[in-house]
Image: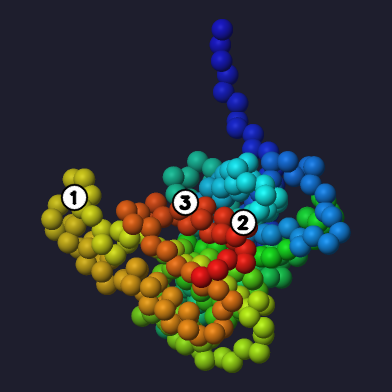
Amino acid sequence: MLSYATPIQIGSTEEWSLLNQRGQEYIVQIGYPRDWDSYKSCPGDEGVPIVYLTDGNSVFLTALEALHRRLSINRTTFSTGVIVAIGYPVPPNSGFIFDARRSWDLTPPALGAKGNEGGADEFIKFINDRVKPFVHERLRDTHAAKVGEEALYGHSLGGLFSLHTLFTHPNSFDCFIASSPSIWWHNEFILKEEATFSKKQSNVINSQKPSLIMFVGGQEQNPPRRRGESDEEHQKREKRHNERRMVSNVFDMYCRLKSSGNLHNISSHVYEGEDHGTVIACSVSRGMTTFLEDWPFQI
């Protein structure tokens, strides 16, 4: 008897193509709970929480599994949640899941930045003016659902983008999740924006201020030697990692922002034994769980 391969069908998901103001295409994937069809909005509820993720091509399925797994394990703390991954039209047979446009989308408009960098404000506008209204409309159309708290997740340059958005557009999201943020980028330009953000005197009550969660892998600053790697190759990689100070930069920023008074809550965590790539799954799962399940989280 012959067996035939069939494409894997993933339920409770949608994929849409949205264009920005330049006419560039983005792939927006929306993930719902597995039993979303039975969801009913109730009067007085706090709405459906939404997590938006940059680099959607690399994190959508990871985030979807994390959402479904937590809902299967724990329905007492939260009963619903939606993820929205913003990615690019990468060919399905491509061996590379990251698009070159991310360098423009995820980096701040710093003086002297490269020609393919510095478009973060344009990307923020696209998310706020195009993606969010579209997602909100989908929730209303499918289940007359009210939108609850919203979070932004980003890793690496995406983590830098999360910090830039927090410092320059703090009211865009309720919670910002920065995984392995590239604080080193462009001579640590983001520290200037952090300083400006911290100096602002906020008259907003504490519960309405944004929150920040930061993650980083322990091996991002102290990388072990890889199998088959020569002493020279390892020393070069170790030097690059030490110069970027991924772990130290996250810790230092956490300490400064904790005392700024401009955040509702802030937390940071170092995943020992994880590198820049493996920490993604850790930060997606823990970041989403913290936001969806433990909100408002405490220091």
**Residue at 56% over, 59% down:** 290
Residue 125: quadrant of the picture: bottom right
Instruction: Identify which residue, 170 or 209, lies in the foreground.
Output: 209
**Amino acid marked by disc 3:** Ala
Using residue 161 as the reference point, say whether residue 35 is left or right of it: right
Using residue 116 as the reference point, say whether residue 124 is left or right of it: right
Label 2 crowd (10 A; few <14 / some 14-19 / many >=20): many
Q: Nearer the viewer, mark 1 or mark 3?
A: 3
Q: Earlier in the sequence, mark 1 or mark 3?
A: 1
**Amino acid marked by disc 1:** Glu
**Residue at 64% over, 38% down:** 10
**Residue at 51% over, 56% down:** 286
Label 1 crowd (10 A; few <14 / some 14-19 / many >=20): few
Secondary structure state at the residue bearing disc 2: helix
Kindly identify which numbered label has been placed on residue 14. none
207 up-or-down from 180: above or below: below
In 3D space, how far apart are the residues under numbered discs 3 and 2 (Cα atoms)? 17 Å
Q: Which residue does the numbered mark 3 point to in the structure image?
A: 281
Residue 143 pos. (x, y %)? 83, 51
Determine if residue 100 is in view. Answer: yes
**Amino acid marked by disc 2:** Glu
Secondary structure state at the residue bearing disc 3: helix
Residue 24 pos. (x, y %)? 63, 63
Using residue 86 as the reference point, say whether residue 268 is left or right of it: left
Instruction: Identify which residue, 247 or 28, lies in the foreground.
Output: 247
Q: Which residue does the numbered mark 2 point to in the structure image?
A: 293
Kindly identify which numbered label has been placed on residue 229. 1
